Amino acid sequence: MPTESTHEPGPSEHRMNWRTILTLLLLAAAIASGWSVWRMSRPIETGVLHARPDYLLRNYEITSLDARGKEQFTLRGPVLERNPTDRAMRLATPEFLVPDAVGSYWEIHADEGIVPPGGGRLEVRGRVSAQSPADRPPATRIESDQLTLDLDHHRATSAGKVTITRPGLTMEGVGLLADFDRRQVSLLSQVRNRYAPQP
């Protein structure tokens, strides 16, 4: 009568099975890790690695207060995202409302904004405009391609070309120093004035 034989794996076969399983697990982990890195940091056309944001806000409104609880500024926009590599925040078409000394608001618009780590100062770029409070004449409008905003002190500076418009007066120059609290706006060099009679 035939008998069934059984084979018990020896110690060497156990070791080989565990090594195979461990190798497959490590390989799978390496593939998953590589895929994750490739997805998070994909080269763009310029060859610079672009990391996916670690957080993203849409259609937001943020009001920042100083240490005394007084409003520093209000920020609105459609998209705000933070880059985990340099921890800078990037803003698409931001709008800033910056109060002056009596609580009236300057309105600042731009195509984009960049807030470096730590905040305080930020850059706004591309079709930048700053409009003085409507209830405090004379109406003043600042236009440039770039402004640096010091939101702690309600000031703005620029090293580029700037146009300032007031009723009956247009001023063009290079470089800007603006104090929103005091409503003082100064062009720093190459200043040209054009006057237009008021109706």
Image (cartoon, rainbow, N blue to C red):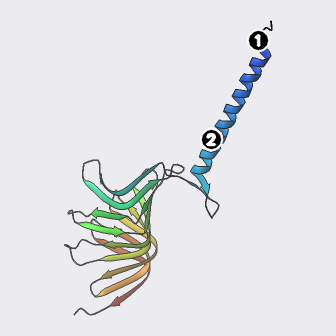
Tell me if residue 123 comes above or below residue 28 in the rendering. below
Secondary structure found at label 1: loop
Give the number of the mark in front: 2 or 1.
1
Q: Quadrant of the N terminus?
A: top right
Residue 16 figure quarter: top right
Alpha carbons under labels 2 and 1: distance apart:
42 Å
Tell me if residue 103 comes above or below residue 117 in the rendering. below
Q: Is residue 28 visible?
A: yes
Which residue in the protein does label 2 denote?
A: 33
Is residue 44 found left or right of 12 in the rendered image?
A: left
Residue 169: x, y in percent?
A: 31, 86
Which residue corresponds to the image point at 29% horizontal and 56% vertical from the top-left? 72
Residue 198: x, y in percent?
A: 24, 91
Q: Quadrant of the C terminus?
A: bottom left
Which residue corresponds to the image point at 66% horizontal and 41% vertical from the top-left? 31
Residue in the foreground of this view, choosing between 22 and 13 = 13
Q: How many marks?
A: 2
Is residue 160 found left or right of 18 in the rendered image?
A: left
Is residue 73 found left or right of 148 in the rendered image?
A: left
| Amino acid type at mark 1 | Thr
Of the two numbered discs 2 and 1 on the same chain, state the one appearing first in sequence. 1
Which residue corresponds to the image point at 62% horizontal and 50% vertical from the top-left? 38
Which residue in the protein does label 1 denote?
A: 6
Q: Residues within 10 Å of mark 2 (few under 14, many from 20)?
A: few
Residue in the foreground of this view, choosing between 15 and 160 = 15
Q: Residues within 10 Å of mark 1 (few under 14, many from 20)?
A: few
Q: Is residue 119 visible?
A: no
Residue 194 figure quarter: bottom left
